[in-house]
Image (cartoon, rainbow, N blue to C red):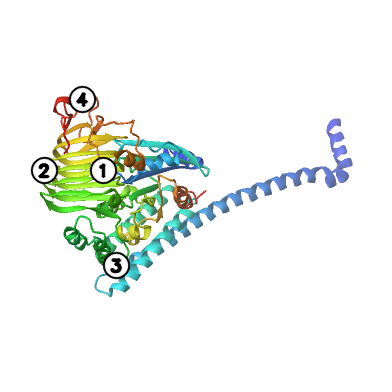
Amino acid sequence: MEVKSDISQENGHCGPIDTGIKIPERMLKREQDRLEDVERKKEAKNSQSVTEEKSEFITAMFSNERAAIEELLAGCSCAIDRSLATQTLEEVTTRTQQLQKFLTDNQKPLPPYVLKQSQVSLQKLQTSLAEKRDEILPKKKFAFKSRATNTSKVSTPVIDPVPRVTQNDSAQTNVDGVISPPEQCGFSHFESKVLIKSAEEIKQKDVLLTHLTNCKVKLLGSPSTVHIKHIQNCEIFSGPVSSSVFVDHCTGSTLSFPCQQLRTHHTTNTQVYLHVTSRAIIEYCQDVHFAPFTWSYPGLDEDFAVSGLDRGRNNWDQVDDFNWLAIGTQSPNWSVIPEADRRADWD
Amino acid sequence: MGLLTILKKMKHKEREMRLLMLGLDNAGKTTILKKFNGEDVSTISPTLGFNIKTLEHKGFKLNIWDVGGQKSLRSYWRNYFESTDGLVWVVDSADRLRLEDCRQELSSLLLEERLSSATLLVFANKQDLPGSLSKEAIREALALDQIKSHHWSIISCSALTGENLLSGVDWLLDDIAARVFTAD
């Protein structure tokens, strides 16, 4: 009782002073905490709805633009003017690209599923655009008109620099002046002839030999590249070739040259007397036989120097057959010519 | 977040790019790769299979795949398409005879879905040869102006001298970086 009254007394005594300072302070702090908490929750909620709104906004923008592009694409057909169609296609292309960029830039707020769906629909759009373009603007077929070159080459005498100029002119006009005249010399469409090119004519040019039958060809110089195509029963000898020799569709022939690389295709029953500083390869070939290069002519040493080939390195017997990828077993498509059967007489 | 997403994010952080180098045989793909890497280019053989080089350039880690271009190998090209960021198409500018072949191979590559997001760089290689075609002629011959599906550029170069190799690769990196890494 005494205690109680004491308390009440204390209360009564201290009351007016303490209520002003102690209790409201605690209360205020609590109130403040509560308010802060509410504020925090509110903020979190707000920001979440912002992301939601933002992602909704992006999705809406995306689908609107996509629909617009689709409509544009659908309206574009061969029936309308070609130039107009081209213009529309251009516009569709740029808008699709912009849309792609828009999606990439704004992918962060998007939920993964929505992002994936958008990407899929964009992909579809691009596919249909590609289809449309193929339909409206079929690809122009590009081809060199080499007929004039060929015919004039046939009629060109073996050594005659003057007609070459006119031949070059015709070649140039044929391809609208875009393609400059080829720095090429060679022989094509000959039968049973002996054909010779001198070092002055060859001088690090590309040499082209095509459609030759029963011919004997000597290239007494150092070409840059040699192409040998559609050859039957010929003997083709060349000085050092500084880069590659291409052989394609060659049968029953004997070839001899030094080169950096040899690439042989669709060739059958052919002997190659070879000096190769990197590798020789065969592809779709049968019955091809290799031996080291032994042919010689006056000036070979100088031509070796011009070509830059290493005389000390000859990998003539390391042939890669691209149709025989089994390591360790010899390809049935090529072989080394036994020493006894190698050719010694070159004239 | 799946493991794959995490891995992808890590890859982005490393700024890693995968470049695929293709072209007809004898175009000079291996020579470009080796020259770019500062190796000897005089003893290169026709590629039977493929070469990979990983190198750092401009703060990017580049994985460059060089796949052989012989006809019998072209059917294997598609094994290398996956997740390619940049396609480098190498052209022998002196090989007029096979330009049409070259155009066809390129256009069929561009239809490939797995390459649809790759940037295309065309190297008009072998400009050191006297008979080589200009890059304008190659652009025309390959009908590059009709390509709308990919970002592309053509750059004339010489793998033998190394001329323009760097500027070509720089362009490719910038284009890929602008596309792939904008989200960061």
Q: Nearer the viewer, residue A9 or A303?
A: A303
The amino acid type of the residue labelled 1 equals Val
The answer to whether A195 is drawn above or below residue A136 in the figure is above
How far apart marks 1 and 3 lie (CA) works out to: 30 Å
Q: Are marks 3 and 2 in contact (CB under 8 Å)?
A: no
Report the chain holding disc 2. A
The label nearer to you, 1 versus 2, is: 2
Tell me, yes or no, whether dots 1 and 2 are on the same chain: yes
Q: Are marks 4 and 2 in contact (CB under 8 Å)?
A: no
Give the mark toward the camera: 1 or 3: 1
Alpha carbon separation for disc pair 4 and 3: 52 Å
Q: Which label sits on residue A233?
A: 2
| Mark 3, secondary structure of its residue | loop
Q: Nearer the viewer, residue B27 or A346?
A: A346
Q: Which residue is mark 4?
A: A329
Which of the 4 image quarters holds residue A26?
A: top right
Residue on which disc 1 sits = A245
